[in-house]
Image (tube, helix red, strand yellow):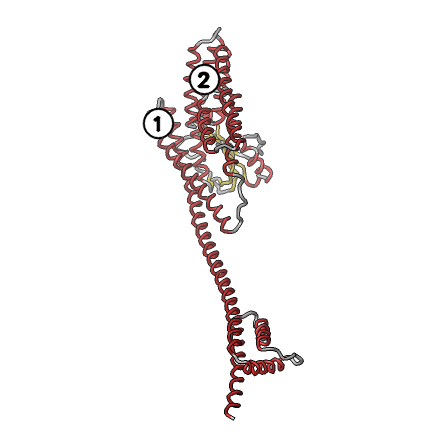
């Protein structure tokens, strides 16, 4: 949490001023500095924004005002004469800073307890189990507050370092116990290494992967509860992780190249968004549980300070939940937009498939028409007598001669075939038109031959 704010505002004369607010947690007060707009350069503004706000010192110009204001849960951080547009930032800082002040008092309490134990250690000649138990009890309280996040991170780290230092002194005073811990850790590490060697050999041999995967899961659970030293724990964990990766690679293989179509990209984005929504909802749920937890703890607090800290934390949780709900609403809106885009893309692809299917059907229809025309031509030619064929050939030859002089007479089949080919080419493979033209030509030629024969018979 930041303990310094820089923002623009207005004073009681409605003049624009730069406002800088800083928390002094140990004194439970805030320092408020204002700088007139006319004397605030861009360089100074950037220094305040990038340096001073990050707790680095910056030289202030002579023209500025300084106000010291007590921090309370009821009153605003700013005096009534100063106005800002982003009141939400001020309100949020007020709730966070109130928590910081109370947390700082709790830190000081634990710090004094640890200091008292260190003083007792200085006067002890040898290891005393009473000091060990006292240190354990204090550390459990510190650890509980670190887990509940009622202590600031840097304070928790400082208390942890002090705790580690005290425990180290106590451990040095009980070397025999430390030696026993190391011996137990070494024995456990040897057992884990032996099991992992067997798993690695089985993976290389290509044995059943699912049983090996289950063995590693059981081993992982045993590892969590094992009393291992820090060095042994790091080495065993690294080997377990490598073994898991080897089994997964053998079982699932390398990832295949993913399709980059628009629908796939939308689906991947949608899946990522749904995962983010799920995480956000779970995060809000955790905050709700945390809030309920703090409500329950308030009824069973050991002192007024702890109750005040938990009330301050509840306000912080409320602010956090409100912020997350706003983000969740935006994510749900994006989800609806993505669903609409995915549906439109699916409809577009379906339409493309329909058009492709229609083209394929049209192509097949054209091929069928061509085949039927050829079959009809052969069938017609087979049923005509030689005299009729000769007359039809002459008629077609005469028609061909009109289109292109110098061509030799052809048989009926070759002439019709050529006519059909030219018609197909001239009409851009439009099968319906070709069928109509060819059929008309054949019908006219045969009809002419039959009328000539009828006239001859009548005469």
**CA distance for labels 1 and 2:** 24 Å
Count every numbered label the image shows and give the total.
Answer: 2
**Near-viewer residue (358 or 6):** 358
Number of residues whose C-alpha sits closer than 10 Å to that of mark 2, classed few (under 14), some (14–19) or many (20 or more): few
Q: Residue furthest bottom?
A: 459
Q: To which residue does mark 1 refer?
A: 297
Q: Is residue 428 visible?
A: yes
- Please tell me whether residue 184 is drawn above or below residue 354 in the rendered image: above
**Near-viewer residue (194 or 418):** 418
- Please tell me whether residue 290 is drawn above or below residue 125 in the rendered image: below
Q: Secondary structure at mark 2?
A: helix
**Near-viewer residue (415 or 309):** 415
Residue 158 position within the rendered picture, expressed as x and y whole percent measured from the top left: 50, 22
Q: Residue furthest right?
A: 406
- In the rendered structure, the answer to whether residue 42 lies left or right of residue 2 reads right
Q: Earlier in the sequence, mark 1 or mark 2?
A: 2
Q: To which residue does mark 2 refer?
A: 112
Q: Which residue is drawn at the image coordinates 38% and 28% (left, top)?
A: 310
Query: Which quadrant of the figure has residue 397?
Result: bottom right
Q: Which residue is drawn at the image coordinates 47% and 54% (left, top)?
A: 345
Query: Which quadrant of the figure has residue 134?
Result: top left
Residue 156 position within the rendered picture, expressed as x and y whole percent measured from the top left: 47, 24
């Amino acid at each position: 949490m930041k303990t310094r704010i820089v923002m623009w505002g207005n004073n009681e004369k409605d003049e624009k001023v730069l406002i800088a607010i800083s928390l002094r947690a140990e004194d439970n007060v805030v320092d408020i500095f204002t700088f007139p707009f006319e004397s605030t350069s861009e360089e100074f503004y950037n220094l305040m924004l990038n340096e001073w706000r990050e707790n680095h010192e910056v030289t202030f110009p002579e023209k500025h005002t300084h106000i010291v204001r007590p921090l309370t849960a009821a009153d605003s951080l700013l005096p009534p004469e100063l106005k800002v547009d982003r009141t939400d930032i001020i309100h949020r800082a007020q709730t966070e800073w109130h928590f910081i002040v109370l947390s700082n008092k709790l830190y000081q309490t634990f710090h004094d307890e640890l200091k008292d134990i260190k003083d007792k250690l200085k006067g002890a000649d040898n290891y005393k189990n009473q000091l060990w138990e006292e240190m354990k009890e204090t550390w459990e309280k510190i650890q509980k507050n670190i887990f509940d996040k009622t202590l600031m991170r840097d304070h928790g780290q400082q208390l942890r370092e002090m705790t580690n230092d005290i425990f180290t002194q106590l451990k040095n005073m009980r070397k025999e116990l430390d030696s026993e811990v190391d011996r137990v850790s070494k024995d456990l590490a040897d057992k884990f290494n032996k099991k992992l060697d067997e798993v690695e050999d089985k993976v290389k041999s290509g044995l059943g992967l699912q049983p090996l995967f289950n063995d590693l899961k059981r081993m992982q659970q045993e590892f969590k509860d094992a009393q291992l030293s820090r060095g042994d724990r790091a080495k065993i964990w690294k080997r377990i992780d490598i073994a898991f990766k080897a089994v997964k690679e053998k079982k699932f293989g390398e990832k295949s190249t993913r399709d980059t179509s628009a629908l796939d990209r939308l689906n991947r984005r949608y899946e990522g968004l749904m995962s983010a929504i799920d995480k956000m909802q779970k995060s809000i749920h955790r905050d709700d549980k945390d809030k309920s937890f703090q409500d329950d703890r308030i009824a069973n607090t050991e002192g007024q300070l702890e109750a005040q800290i938990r009330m301050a934390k509840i306000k912080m949780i409320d602010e956090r939940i409100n912020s997350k709900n706003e983000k969740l609403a935006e994510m749900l809106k994006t989800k609806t937009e993505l669903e609409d885009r995915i549906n439109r893309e699916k409809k577009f692809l379906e339409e493309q498939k329909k058009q492709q299917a229609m083209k394929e059907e049209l192509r097949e229809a054209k091929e069928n028409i061509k085949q039927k025309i050829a079959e009809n031509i052969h069938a017609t030619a087979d049923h005509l007598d030689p005299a009729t064929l000769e007359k039809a050939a002459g008629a077609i030859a005469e028609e061909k001669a009109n289109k292109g002089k110098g061509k030799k007479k052809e048989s009926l089949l070759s002439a019709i075939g050529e006519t059909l080919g030219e018609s197909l080419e001239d009409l851009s493979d439009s099968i319906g038109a070709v069928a109509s033209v060819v059929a008309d030509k054949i019908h006219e030629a045969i009809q002419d031959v039959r009328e000539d024969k009828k006239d001859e018979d009548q005469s």
